[in-house]
Amino acid sequence: MPIRKKESSEQHLVIKPHLQNPVNPVQKAPKTAQNGKGPPPQEPQNPKLHNQTSPPAKNRGRRRGRGGRKSDQGDVCMRPSSRHCAVAHLPASPSLGGAAPLATSPNGYVENGGNSVSMEMGFPTSSKSLSFAPRPGYGQVGIKCIVKANHFFAELPEKDLNHYDVSITPEVASRALNRAIMAELVRLYKESDLGMRLPAYDGRKSLYTAGELPFAWKEFNIKLVDEPDGISGRKREREYKVVIKFVARANMHHLGQFLAGKCADAPQEALQILDIVLRELSNKRYCPIGRSFFSPNIRTPQRLGEGLESWCGFYQSIRPTQMGLSLNIDMASAAFIEPLPVIEFVAQLLGKDVLSRTLSDADRVKIKKALRGVKVEVTHRGSVRRKYRVSGLTSQPTRELVFPVDENLTMKSVIEYFQEMYGFTIQHGHLPCLQACKIVEGQRYTKRLNEKQITALLKVTCQRPRDRENDILQTVQHNAYDQDPYAKEFGIKISEKLASVEARILPAPWLKYHETGKEKNCLPQVGVARFLSVIMSPFYGSTTNTLAACLLVMQKMINGMTVSRWACINFSRGVQESVARGFCSELAQMCQVSGMEFNSEPVIPIYNARPEQVEKALKHVYHASMNKTKGKDLELLLAILPDNNGSLYGDIKRICETDLGLISQCCLTKYVFKISKQYLANVSLKINVKMGGRNTVLLDAISCRIPLVSDIPTIIFGADVTHPENGEDSSPSIAAVVASQDWPEVTKYAGLVCAQAHRQELIQDLYKTWQDPVRGTVSGGMIRDLLVSFRKATGQKPLRIIFYRDGVSEGQFYQVLLYELDAIRKACASLEPNYQPPVTFIVVQKRHHTRLFANNHRDRSSIDKSGNILPGTVVDTKICHPTEHDFYLCSHAGIQGTSRPAHYHVIWDENNFTADGIQSLTNNLCYTYARCTRSVSVVPPAYYAHLAAFRARFYLEPDMQENGSTGHTAKGTRAAGESGVRPLPALKENKWKRVDGLVTETRLARKDAAITR
């Protein structure tokens, strides 16, 4: 990350320890011209902004322990934090404000140059003393409109809801069997012992009724009868003892008070009961997976390849909203294993005829991995279909398998046994035992899909907004909640109309480009930086060419970088040298037109290599280039990849970034042949930010006109944790934290990535202390390191923190806030006594099922080209939380399918953002994403953190375990940390990245922190 030194002398900003709580004045943004005729007028910057001594903090009392009212410009430079992270360490204990380093003494005080200072950590230590930020009001900025949401109003039942505990002996692990037992109990005793009650059951330990049962405790004996075994004709009986015991009565009055906004804590038990009641009938009709239901009868399954098919279904969840209870219904699709005879499944899996060929060792490994854990049913016993789970695959063919049949160890072959016992002839003895079984229907495929399967599934799931809306309405009508016996029993009524919601379309921000471009300032239209389609250029061809290409005719990157030494390596056999040479020439020309200084010729001729020799080829190009340039480092490596390249992409990134210290840009073969100007323009944007440049900035940012950002030095964080795929039980989770490194522009970000315990959502390395034999207790961690980096990059100390946290579910809000905000506090206090800048903590959610539709799909002024709602559409009423500060923002223009708005939940706010303030800031930041000319769907800090964590997983080398499953281990030599998780390998330092003598902690081996294909 390039760092600009301040020409003026450094201002050391100090927060006084005993400030009164000044009221934060509402800052009105100056009126700006938003009619597209010109940018807002420039205003002189106020030099006093850089000399403020303390940020205003209206509600700092809540931070002190009151608990509140009870109720790539974004190219991320990934480097390590102080412990167990990738890359090298920061200088020992740097002080943010230039004071002496701080250390934590055993008695809990912070020592600063020998003076002990109490660390006043007023943040609550438990959820009981914690309440989330209340809604500060409703937004008013923007053009008002009406949208429809896939929420259906639910009337609150007036009946008492009772909770009973269920104990089944012997204990049963299967929910399906539990449900069968309870269904039999209800069938036998509903009209007698149950007092005509129709209970709802969660499949585990809880039973719910509308009204009390005639007893507080009762024991039942239930018998289940299996089908006859097909040999003796006997039916197998199983007997279970079921004990039902009263637990509690749900407080429906409390729920009503919460929905009315009169109390802040949600009665989770009442909501859970209603959710279970509305799911009870669907559990019987469909295949339940999580909160969704699937069936091959909803829509004809589509084959995905290799023995998989897609099933259509729907998601359903009851939610508390400002309009009361609502039922959220959305369409869903998932990959299921096709219910085929196992032999046919194997043939599809391998893509070849297996009946006449023997299986190779690689074939056996693939079959074993695909079938392990899959439920199959036998087909050789007539009507009896016993079910089993596959645990492995025999190494020998069936014709060689024998086993003892009596105590004398008389051996008999499997083929003979099946013929004599069942009259079943095994025809293909050269195969493993696969022939007498069929895959049971309704098994979701949980492993990773390949690219062809993903493409096929996306074709099924990608629906235009109008089609998706119609399918949702049809689903609600088909479910017929008004006829649902469980809904009737509990007095729940569901509307069949989509909720109509008031929304606003926020104005797009003005963007600043380079002064030498034809347009210095730009007002994006429909989520895309504005361009004139009538402007023609021989270089760009016809007017139908793409947005990015046309954009760059008129505008140039605000900070274009220089690439003097670059090389290209071609891993695609289908790309001839002349084609690769032409592509590189076009790309170089595009970079030049865009505002970069880019050498037209590579250092060495384009090098052709085979994918299986990736490491050898990369090192050859690296050393050949070094020899040609007499020891000067290569600045950029272009790599042409096959369209289906398996692990090649990840291997290139891992080797370049952890071994060679190279910046790489990968390009797929299909784009090399096509040579689309849009693609070249987007790649040039990526290359520029990888080299440390910036493509654009917000005009209001450089004019210091962003409320609660431009007034005092503000740092914006983004954080995310990515977890390994299902089935990878030993792989670590990867945490990433990024932070802005320029102010007031807020466009450059540096990042840290760190491995942590498997499936751990809390970011463990935000703040750390450890014992050093020389320095004693040393403080570090990701937050601390990034604060220091910001100070060095800007010459300013952050006086305000805005923290966007991605990937947190609602059930984890309290836990994440308690742990991570406390870590932020400690990181700040470790740098300077009483240094506690106010924090705003915002959770970003994309994995939700709320969709917004235009009120009138025929009104072209209210939709974009894809039929979706317009970018900038924000909703903070009706379908949002009754009391807390949240909103839905669709910041991007749809391309295909139905746009998913991002859900932002402000769970802690000491900066006292207004609704308009945080919504406008978030929307404006979405236009600063470095790698494209469009606004993006998620605020860039969170986006960069997600991409950084995703990239870091490439640094883990695959490790084939004994059972055949693939895990990952970190390539490194350092010992495991206290958590037992090996650290990520260090990123290779690029020595030429030292600029003006600055340390390279923010410029280590530039990372694009993205999937840059």
Image (tube, rainbow, N blue to C red):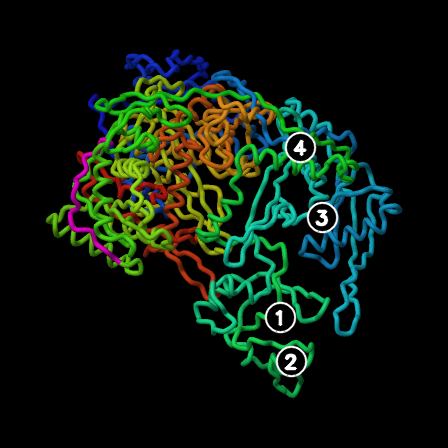
- Residue type at mark 3 is Lys
Crowding near the residue tagged with mark 4, few <14, some 14–19, many ≥20 C-alpha atoms within 10 Å: some
Residue position marked by numbered label 3 in the rendering = 284
- Residue type at mark 4 is Pro
Residue position marked by numbered label 1 in the rendering = 436
* Viewer-side label of 2, 4: 2
Q: Which residues are magenta?
A: 594-609
Q: Earlier in the sequence, mark 2 or mark 1?
A: 2
Residue position marked by numbered label 4 in the rendering = 267
Q: Quadrant of the C terminus?
A: top left
Q: SS of the residue at dot 3?
A: helix
**x and y, in percent, of residue 573 in the image:** 29, 56
Residue located at (46% from left, 23% from top): 918
**x and y, in percent, of residue 609 in the image:** 25, 57
Q: CA distance from mark 3 to mark 1?
A: 29 Å
- Residue type at mark 1 is Ala
Residue located at (36% from left, 44% from top): 1011
Q: Is residue 769 above or below residue 534?
A: below
Q: Earlier in the sequence, mark 2 or mark 3?
A: 3
Residue located at (22% from left, 31% from top): 595
Report the disc number at residue 837. none
